[in-house]
């Protein structure tokens, strides 16, 4: 079991109950869509998985490690196992494509040779080798998102969390990104994709985890989503 949540709830100081009584199991290699309206708890769940926040109660276990109990010094090692892709890319504007991708390795003190080799591998995976010296402002939206995906994958994470990865993209580019994510999954990475896009969910027919007001209301294999 790669991800296990037991009786997880999250309540903020203002009284908002973002998650309640979440029990969840995700195996290595799964492709899971997390769906639900705005405020349903999707982003909160993602933040718990990368230990950006802690639950109010319950346990969150990633690859055998209880992230609630881990020391702060262990968090960077957890995050090497989890790549994250955001709707708004979050690229560093003054760094090139290659520098954006390499940055994740540099800050974790990888040797220079490993930085070069892994950066080139990640760029090739997302078909951006020819754009490696360009800056984010010189890229299309799809190219920016592919750069963000390469950055998320450069550490060879076991899990990739994508939070509305196609939210700012046109339909054609959206499907290009989805095809890339399918390829990433075929390489053995576990995918958790939060989305409002019912067309994508219904076309791919993967596992669907539906959140509503912080609770799991449906967990279905080969599921559909009526947004």
Image (cartoon, rainbow, N blue to C red):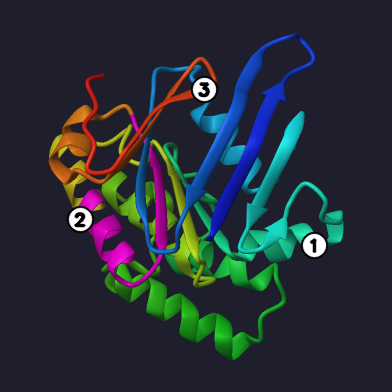
Mark 2 lies on a secondary structure that is helix
* Label 3: how many Cα within 10 Å (few below 14, some 14–19, many 20+): some
Give the residue pinned by disc 2: 179
Q: Is residue 51 above or below residue 122?
A: above
Q: Magenta residues?
A: 178-195
Residue 103 in the image: x percent, y percent?
59, 66
Work out which quarter of the rendered image holds the C terminus and state it. top left
Q: Quadrant of residue 22?
A: top right
The answer to which of marks 2 and 3 sits earlier in the sequence is: 2
How packed mark 2 is, by other alpha carbons closer than 10 Å (few <14, some 14-19, many 20 or more), is: few
**How many angstroms separate mark 3 from mark 1 (CA)?**
29 Å
Front-most of residues 27 and 92: 27
Q: Residue at x 55, y 51 (%)?
A: 92
Report, in whole angstroms, how far the alpha carbon at label 2 lies from the one at label 3. Answer: 30 Å
- Residue receiving disc 3: 215
- Of badges 3 and 1, the one in the foreground is 3
| 122 in relation to 86, above or below | below
Q: Most extreme residue toward the top, as rendered?
A: 15
Camera-side mark, 2 or 3: 3
Say what secondary structure mark 1 lies in. Answer: helix
């Amino acid at each position: 079991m790669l991800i296990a949540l037991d009786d997880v709830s999250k309540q903020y100081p203002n009284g908002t109950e973002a998650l309640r009584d979440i029990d969840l199991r995700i195996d290595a290699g799964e492709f899971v869509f997390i769906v639900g309206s705005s405020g349903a708890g999707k982003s909160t769940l993602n933040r718990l998985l990368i230990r950006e926040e802690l639950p109010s109660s319950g346990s969150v276990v990633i690859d055998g490690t209880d992230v609630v109990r881990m020391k702060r010094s262990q968090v960077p090692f957890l995050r090497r196992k989890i790549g994250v892709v955001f709707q708004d890319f979050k690229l560093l504007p003054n760094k090139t494509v290659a520098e954006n991708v390499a940055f994740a390795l540099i800050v974790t003190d990888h040797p220079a040779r490993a930085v070069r080799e892994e950066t080139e591998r990640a760029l090739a995976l997302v078909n951006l080798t020819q754009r490696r010296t360009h800056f984010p402002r010189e890229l299309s939206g799809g190219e920016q998102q592919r750069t963000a995906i390469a950055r998320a994958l450069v550490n060879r994470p076991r899990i990739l969390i994508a939070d509305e990865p196609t939210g700012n993209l046109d339909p054609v580019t959206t499907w290009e990104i989805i095809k890339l994510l399918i390829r990433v999954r075929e390489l053995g990475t576990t995918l958790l994709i939060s989305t409002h896009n019912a067309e994508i969910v219904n076309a791919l027919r993967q596992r669907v985890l539906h959140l509503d007001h912080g609770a799991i209301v449906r967990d279905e294999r080969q599921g559909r989503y009526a947004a």
